[in-house]
Image (spheres, rainbow, N blue to C red):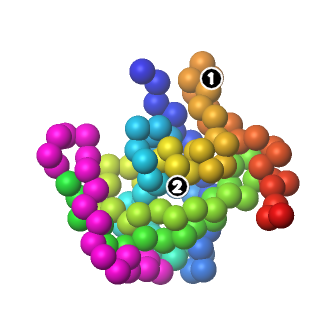
């Protein structure tokens, strides 16, 4: 099993920061370690607490905040919501919903994530 982890630039209303993003097709949603949020964006309270299941069966994490962040892959601007997770083992996890939304492909032969350049030209119709 291959792990794909790449440094990406993340930007919010308070600043920007290079963080290592782990691409995890087994994670439904994207998330960010709470330690890295304060310099980038102000977290928004979700209104209702979410109980997010983790790999160990029966283990849940309480999530109360999220942030919307821009991030760049190959100089292509992407954006999504990231759940703010205290004590997350990674700096950032890019989940399946974000990968599907932006057509990110995982190339395990070369250990890279690839975004289709056509995504940069996507627009609302």
Residue 17 appears in view: no
Residue at 85%, 54% in the rendered image? 121
Give x and y (percent) for residue 46.
38, 76
Left or right side of 125 for 25: left
Q: Quadrant of the N terminus?
A: top left
Q: CA distance from mark 1 to mark 2?
A: 20 Å
Picture quadrant of residue 32: bottom left
Span shown in magenta: 42-59
Secondary structure, mark 1, is loop
Give x and y (percent) for residue 25.
47, 38
Of the pair 93 and 8, the residue shown nearer to us? 93
Which residue has dot 1 on it? 110
Picture quadrant of residue 43: bottom left
Picture quadrant of residue 72: bottom right
Left or right side of 66 for 97: right
Residue at 76%, 41% in the rendered image? 116
Above or below: residue 111 compared with residue 99: above
Does 90 appear in magenta?
no
Of the pair 56 and 41, the residue shown nearer to us? 56
Q: Residues within 10 Å of mark 1 (few under 14, many from 20)?
A: few
Label disc, if present, on residue 31 of the rendered structure: none
Q: Residues within 10 Å of mark 2 (few under 14, many from 20)?
A: some
Residue at 59%, 73% in the rendered image? 12
Does 54 appear in magenta?
yes
Label disc, if present, on residue 19 of the rendered structure: 2
């Amino acid at each position: 099993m291959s792990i794909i982890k790449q440094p990406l630039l993340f930007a919010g209303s308070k600043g920007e920061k290079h963080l290592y993003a782990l691409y995890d097709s087994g994670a439904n949603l994207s998330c960010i370690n709470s330690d890295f949020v304060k310099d980038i964006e102000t977290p928004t309270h979700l209104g209702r607490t979410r109980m997010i299941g983790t790999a160990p069966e029966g283990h849940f994490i309480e999530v109360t905040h999220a942030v919307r962040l821009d991030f760049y892959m190959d100089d292509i601007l992407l954006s999504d919501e990231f759940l703010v997770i205290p004590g997350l083992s990674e700096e950032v996890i890019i989940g399946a919903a974000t990968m599907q939304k932006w057509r990110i492909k995982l190339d395990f032969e070369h250990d890279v994530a690839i975004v289709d350049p056509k995504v940069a030209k996507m627009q609302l119709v």
